[in-house]
Image (cartoon, rainbow, N blue to C red):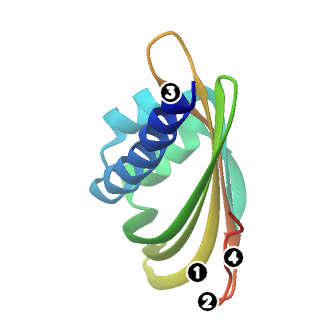
Amino acid sequence: MAQDAGNAEQQIISLSKDKWQWMSDKNVDKLATLFDDKAKFVHMSGTWKKDEELEIIKTGSIWYRKADVHDVAVELFDDTAIIWSRITLESTVRGSEAKVEFTVTEVYKKNAKDWKLLALTFSSVRDTHVIKH
């Protein structure tokens, strides 16, 4: 059982890392498969649903150029996983360059064949912020 949990944790860490790359690449096809239809995305400037988030990424209204992941913590609850990632995000937001420190909270749920992202929340933090393990 512990080995299964370790495998699931690694799957979530890998999936989260892939997600950042897909966002950088504006790969909305892969993201559309990953995002649950009822997913919500909480940003500093608003909360959006799946279709809105995909449109923002596709058009480059927000371009997630690079997410430098400093630390992660994962907790598993049956078929649900939460990952907290401490990142430095380099982005372009409506034409303006930004480099911001965040702790990002992602909630995933395992369905019959894969993990789906249910929620993603950006929390702005100081550069000294540490995730508790």
The answer to whether marks 2 and 4 mark residues whose Cβ atoms lie closer than 8 Å is no
Of helix, strand and loop, which one carries label 3? helix
Mark seen at residue 127: 2
Closer to the chain start, of discs 4 and 1, is: 1
Image side of residue 76 versus residue 16, left or right:
right
Q: What amino acid is at disc 4?
A: Ser
- Please tell me how crowded label 3 is: few (under 14), some (14-19), or many (20+) other residues with Cα within 10 Å: few
**Residue 17: x, y in percent?**
39, 53
CA–CA distance in space, label 3 to label 4: 33 Å
The answer to whether marks 4 and 1 mark residues whose Cβ atoms lie closer than 8 Å is yes
Mark seen at residue 124: 4
Mark seen at residue 4: 3
Image side of residue 53 versus residue 81, left or right:
left
Q: What amino acid is at disc 3?
A: Asp
* Quadrant holding the C terminus: bottom right
CA–CA distance in space, label 2 to label 4: 10 Å
Closer to the chain start, of discs 1 and 3, is: 3
**Residue 111: x, y in percent?**
55, 15
Image side of residue 87 versus residue 81, left or right:
left
Is label 2 or label 3 in front? Answer: 3
**Residue 44: x, y in percent?**
70, 69
Residue picked out by circle 1: 101
Of helix, strand and loop, which one carries label 4? strand
Q: What amino acid is at disc 1?
A: Glu
On screen, residue 56 above or below 35: below
Image quadrant in which you'd find residue 64: bottom left
> Residue placed at 69% from the left, 80% from the top?
125
